Amino acid sequence: MVGVFAALYAALVYAFPGISFQLVQIRVADALIPLSMLFGWPVIAGVTIGCTVANMTSPMPSVVVDVMGGSIANFVAGFLALKIGRSDKIRGSEFLGCLAATLVLTFIVGTYLSILTAIPLWLWWLSIFIGSFVSINLLGYMLIQVLKKTKMAVEWD
């Protein structure tokens, strides 16, 4: 399962390179992060490894920083989405899990990209937030709802 999610993540980044990197980015592959709420650790590991592979072709000034920073951000985002999204005690937990993932990517990725590019921090945070909100809170949230309704998802631990 981990390999499937890693390959999907990397393939989606490579399929949409024009919107997966740069200041304005809607990384369609990040729509996979909320799947950690349904499939657990295989998704967290998969989106982390997939990001590592995908960011090796990063056009940013430091590929090493982008590989490490993006992978750490995906790991934390997937983990928080899993923990918050599966909570029975929080109303709207799945949406809040998606929002937590969006905020993690916004602050981690936006911060290191600001340092690498000398573009103002607030601009990176704004652009990453908007793109991540679209990919995670809209596309990813819809994806988990569809999978739950079609009974294609099983919880893995």
Image (cartoon, rainbow, N blue to C red):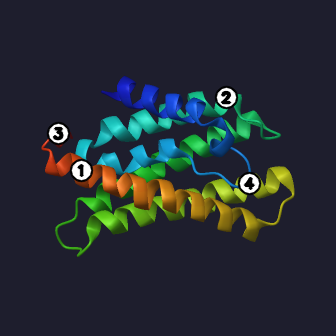
Give yes or no for contact between labels 3 and 2 (Cβ–Cβ under 8 Å).
no
Give yes or no for contact between labels 1 and 4 (Cβ–Cβ under 8 Å).
no
Q: Nearer the viewer, mark 3 or mark 2?
A: 3
Would you call the spot at circle 3 few (<14 residues within 10 Å), some (14-19), or many (20 or more)? few
Q: Where 96 sits versus 11, above or below?
A: below
Would you call the spot at circle 4 few (<14 residues within 10 Å), some (14-19), or many (20 or more)? some
Q: Which residue is mark 2?
A: 56
Instruction: Report the Cα–Cα distance between label 4 and label 3.
Output: 35 Å
**Mark nearer the N terminus (1 vs 2):** 2
Question: Type of residue at label 1?
Answer: Val
**Mark nearer the N terminus (3 vs 2):** 2
Question: Type of residue at label 4?
Answer: Leu
Q: The C terminus lies in which quarter of the figure?
A: top left
Instruction: Report the Cα–Cα distance between label 1 and label 4.
Output: 30 Å
In what element is the residue under mark 3? loop
The disc at residue 89 is: none
The disc at residue 146 is: 1
In what element is the residue under mark 2? helix
Q: The N terminus lies in which quarter of the figure?
A: top left
Q: Which residue is mark 3?
A: 152
Would you call the spot at circle 2 few (<14 residues within 10 Å), some (14-19), or many (20 or more)? some
Question: Type of residue at label 3?
Answer: Met
The disc at residue 23 is: 4
Q: Position of residue 89 (x, y in %)?
A: 19, 73
Q: Where 81 sits versus 16, above or below?
A: below
